[in-house]
Amino acid sequence: MTYCLAITMDAGLVFASDSRTNAGADQVSTYSKMHTFEVEEDRVFVLLAAGNLATTQAVLARLKRDIEDSAEESLHTVRGMSDAAEYLGRVNREEQEKHGEALTKAGFRADASFIIGGQFAGQEPEIYLVYPQGNFITASSHTRFLQIGESKYGKPILDRIISPEGSLGDAARCALVSIDSTMRSNVTVGPPIEVIVYERDSLTFEHYLCLEADDDYLTDLKRSWDDNIKAAFRDLPRFDWEAARGRKRRGTEVTVNRRSTRKPSKKTG
Amino acid sequence: MTYCLAITMDAGLVFASDSRTNAGADQVSTYSKMHTFEVEEDRVFVLLAAGNLATTQAVLARLKRDIEDSAEESLHTVRGMSDAAEYLGRVNREEQEKHGEALTKAGFRADASFIIGGQFAGQEPEIYLVYPQGNFITASSHTRFLQIGESKYGKPILDRIISPEGSLGDAARCALVSIDSTMRSNVTVGPPIEVIVYERDSLTFEHYLCLEADDDYLTDLKRSWDDNIKAAFRDLPRFDWEAARGRKRRGTEVTVNRRSTRKPSKKTG
């Protein structure tokens, strides 16, 4: 499995990905799912990949070859991020078709999804999610992040924290927390975690992190988050019946629950 | 969709469920998914249901009729919680078979899952998850909660908070936070939220809550949690490059990140 996400903020873009792949529980490997393409002063792309590893590798190889061969359409020729997403979608579909039928017969899937984002000189920074079928969506002023792979465990924290005017550091931290929560709940998502923080209009990648499981910052962040979450939880309002039973365990706690408990009304038997 | 969960603590059991059902986006209804069965001083059951609504209603009706008809096997005759899970699994499978073929032909599924839990006099409190195929699992000393339906969004907070020696109030609060997070991320999970807190060896249901969307306690809890989470997030360690750029925005923040940033190494193009 995989978990990758991209966040668009007023100040720029954040990309993050885990690095675990698995084909069954006994074939677990580590592959980077984050790839960058850069034409100095002109355009920068970050690509995040999820799905069938053979497909994502084939797509990556095609993108590089199209550049090397100076093909009619490549990441060097497309004129904007939505053109790049369209091109990526076509390549993705074509690569899936090569082995798709044989894979389906064998009970496997060739599907791959991508996030592509970055900026062209003179244009806005953008992120796009490219589906296995080749179609694609972008973020919006209300939907500030896109996810591929095992996206559910890490979504609630993004829903709560991400707001467009936050700092890129906040967005990158939130992405790390989101991936950490996913790693705790699903063993097929694992380190190292890669993060790129792209500052609007910089047209270069200044901040890149590759955090191994024992990385100092990641360890600090995880410990702090775990402590802080537990403290946040301890400070929640108590139920009436807890106060009534003398279960107040902290001097500062206030029971604000005004609801009285009652027995279930639909009891039978 | 649905989200139900049960938690087993040293002090007893907690059950919680949302109340939204949908068949397509234009057929959204409110149904309780929590049902109780009680034989005074002898046994108590809580049933949580997810999946095809017709199946879960048919299963519930069968359980009640088997009791009324004094059938050979019913929740009144089973001798322990695992027998109850076995019986429920059989009824579930039988009810699915009635319409399963027709449903499959029409592109629908008859599947239903259940959580059944409670206590028999003289036995331990227990919770079981019954799959659509009729097989079932129980919790363990390391796996303290069981979930059915839309379980992923709400799992990380359970993974972090639930420990066996916590109070039943903590477990009930954590269940509410877990359901609230799920409701934020998936519109097919919705209020009212029902909660039963069962105290070990009480053989009765003392604490039952049915929290509508505008319930005072739920509103307080959600607001507190949102505030606390944001505070917890603000207190996380900063990246080196944030401090370096003078982005420290709070007097109490300390940058503990010792990692230096570097450029992506696998840049191409």
Image (cartoon, coloured by chain):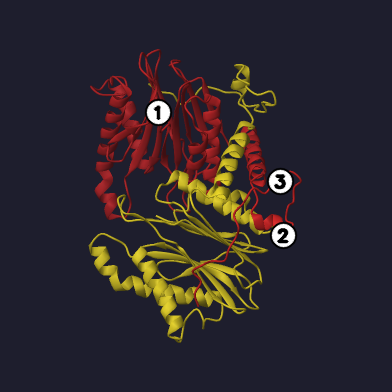
Chain colours: A red, B yellow
What amino acid is at disc 2?
Answer: Arg
| Residue A203 drawn above or below residue B28 | above
The chain letter for the residue carrying disc 3 is: A
In the rendered image, residues at marks 1 and 2 fall on the same chain: yes
| Residue A172 drawn above or below residue B151 | above
| Residue A24 drawn above or below residue B128 | above
Q: CA distance from mark 1 to mark 3?
A: 38 Å
Q: CA distance from mark 2 to mark 3?
A: 14 Å
In the rendered image, residues at marks 2 and 3 fall on the same chain: yes
Quadrant of the snapshot with the C terminus of chain B: top left
> Which residue has dot 2 on it?
A245
Crowding around mark 1 (Cα neighbors within 10 Å: few <14, some 14 to 19, many 20+) is few
Evaluate if marks 2 and 3 touch, with contact meaning CB atoms under 8 Å apart.
no
Residue A228 at x, y = what percent? 65, 39
Residue B41 at x, y = what percent? 62, 78
Which of the two discs, 1 and 3, sits closer to the camera? 3
What amino acid is at disc 3?
Answer: Glu
The chain letter for the residue carrying disc 2 is: A
> Which residue has dot 3 on it?
A253
Q: Is residue B74 visible?
A: yes
> Which residue has dot 1 on it?
A141
Q: Is residue A18 visible?
A: no
The answer to which of marks 1 and 3 sits earlier in the sequence is 1
Examine the image and state in which quarter residue A210 appears: top right
Closest to the observer, B243 or B38: B38
What amino acid is at disc 1?
Answer: Ser
Q: CA distance from mark 1 to mark 2?
A: 48 Å
Residue B6 at x, y = what percent? 55, 61
How many numbered discs?
A: 3
User: Is A75 left or right of A145, judged from the image as shown?
Assistant: left
The answer to which of marks 1 and 2 sits earlier in the sequence is 1
